[in-house]
Amino acid sequence: MKITSQIIKFTFVGLISAVVDLCTLYISIELGVYTYGAISVAFFLGLITNLWLHARITFETKLKTENSIKFLLIVGMNYGITLGMVFVSQQMWQIYLLGKLASIPMVAINGFLWGKYWVFRK
């Protein structure tokens, strides 16, 4: 598969996952869930969406225990990036959403490179 096609699919899947993540975060915050709890729930739902769609659409493979575990390791790294950026944003501007939005491109680039060359490598 050409890398251009993969990047387009990766971006599309990422947008779907981001919408799931951000909508869940917004709804959770509006329902009174503590910010970091809401971020965790949103991240988890985005993760499940992301894992399944990337395996099926972006990298055209089946989910296996091995690639799921590798994916979760990368997600752990991305989760740390997200929490760190939200923390900095809240400390500097008292705006959690700014940090969350700023983390998305970093997490996307990290996820694509690790996904293509390690997690879903055929």
Image (cartoon, grey):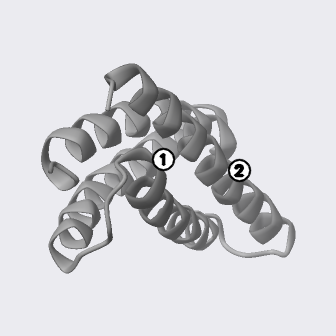
Q: Estimate the x, y position of residue 110 in percent, counting from the top left.
A: 30, 36
The residue pinned by badge 2 equals 19
The residue tagged with tag 1: helix, strand or loop? helix
54 vs 110, nearest the viewer: 54
* Residue 66 visible in the current orientation: yes
- Measured in 3D between alpha carbons, the distance from the residue under mark 1 to the one under mark 2, in whole angstroms, is 21 Å
Disc number placed over residue 7 in the picture, else none: none
Horizontal side of 117 relative to 62 (left or right) equals left
Residue at x-position 42% and y-position 45%: 58
Disc number placed over residue 87 in the picture, else none: 1
Residue at x-position 26% and y-position 61%: 71
Q: Quadrant of residue 26?
A: bottom right
Residue at x-position 47% and y-position 38%: 10
The residue tagged with tag 2: helix, strand or loop? helix
* Residue 90 visible in the current orientation: no
Q: Quadrant of the N terminus?
A: top left
In this rendering, the count of numbered labels is 2
Horizontal side of 19 relative to 48 (left or right) equals right
